[in-house]
């Protein structure tokens, strides 16, 4: 197989691997920016807190998000084929916790100021940055789906302080946020 071809997980030779606890212990140490990934189907808005977000290519502008297949926003995003990645600032700590709280799904969009840009996916109007995307490709990866977005619009407020997440805690560059 030429090295540059795509390959499936099934093509990878099975080694011992590591257990999920060891993996999580390591991944907790990878500091991340915090986002709320949103979609909409008609008037219904859905979203979740996500840190598994990554820039993919600049030309064309593409990014990826890894979303658990059990998350409430998973199937609606595949259906709507639009999503927005809203990068949170330190003042959005409560929103980050709300959009990760399974017991408070219905009140999520009652908090924060929401609008739209190009696709109709909910945009947090005072986000640090928002990337409004059309869903380009998906890749099923066991419990998660990798969503590849083609960015249609970007808004930024670069003077805000980013909300960070590392070792199980939210924080900011300046001081602990929570
Ligand atoms: C800091 C943080 C980061 C998270 N990152 C992700 C992520 O990248 N992908 C994901 O599917 N869930 C992630 N989650 C979990 C979801 O936010 C959480 O399971 C949420 O409740 C799912 O939405 P639902 O309640 O509508 O199903 C994260 C949670 C937290 C607190």
Image (cartoon, rainbow, N blue to C red):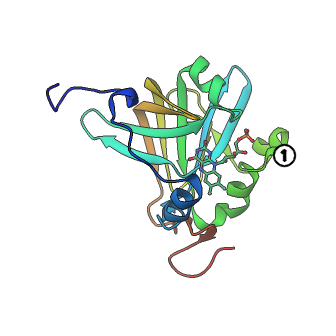
x and y, in percent, of residue 2 in the image: 14, 27
What number of labels is visible?
Answer: 1
x and y, in percent, of residue 62 in the image: 35, 36
Residue projecting furthest to the left: 2
Say whether residue 47 is left or right of residue 66: right
Residue situated in front as seen by the camera: 145 or 21:
21
Q: In this view, does 118 lie above or below 25?
A: above
Quadrant the N terminus occupies:
top left
| Label 1 beta carbon less than 8 Å to ligand 1 | no
Q: In this view, does 75 lie above or below 49?
A: above
x and y, in percent, of residue 78 in the image: 57, 21
Say whether residue 75 is left or right of residue 7: right
Label 1 Cα crowd, 10 Å radius (few <14 / some 14-19 / many 20+): few
Residue situated in front as seen by the camera: 166 or 153:
166
Q: In this view, does 172 lie above or below 132?
A: below
x and y, in percent, of residue 54 in the image: 41, 47
Disc 1 is placed on an element classified as helix
Residue situated in front as seen by the camera: 9 or 42:
9
Quadrant the C terminus occupies:
bottom right
Residue projecting furthest to the bottom: 175
The residue depicted at 57 percent of the width and 38 percent of the height is: 67
Q: Name the residue under label 1.
A: 104
The residue depicted at 62 percent of the width and 68 percent of the height is: 170
């Amino acid at each position: 197989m030429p090295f540059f071809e795509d390959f499936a997980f099934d093509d990878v030779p099975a080694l011992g691997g590591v257990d999920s606890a060891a993996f999580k212990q390591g991944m907790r140490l990878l500091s991340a920016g915090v986002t709320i990934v949103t979609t909409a189907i008609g008037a219904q808005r859905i979203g979740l807190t996500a840190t598994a977000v990554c820039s993919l290519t600049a030309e064309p502008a593409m990014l990826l998000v890894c979303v658990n297949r059990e998350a409430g926003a998973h199937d609606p995003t595949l259906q709507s084929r639009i999503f927005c990645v809203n990068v949170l600032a330190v003042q959005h700590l409560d929103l980050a916790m709300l959009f990760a709280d399974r017991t408070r799904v219905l009140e999520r969009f009652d908090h924060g100021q929401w609008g739209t840009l190009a696709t109709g996916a909910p945009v947090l109007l005072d986000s640090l940055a928002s990337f409004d995307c059309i869903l380009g490709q998906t890749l099923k990866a066991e419990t998660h789906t990798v969503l590849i977005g083609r960015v249609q619009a970007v808004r930024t407020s670069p003077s805000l302080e980013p909300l960070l997440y590392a070792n199980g805690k939210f924080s900011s560059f300046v001081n602990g946020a929570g």
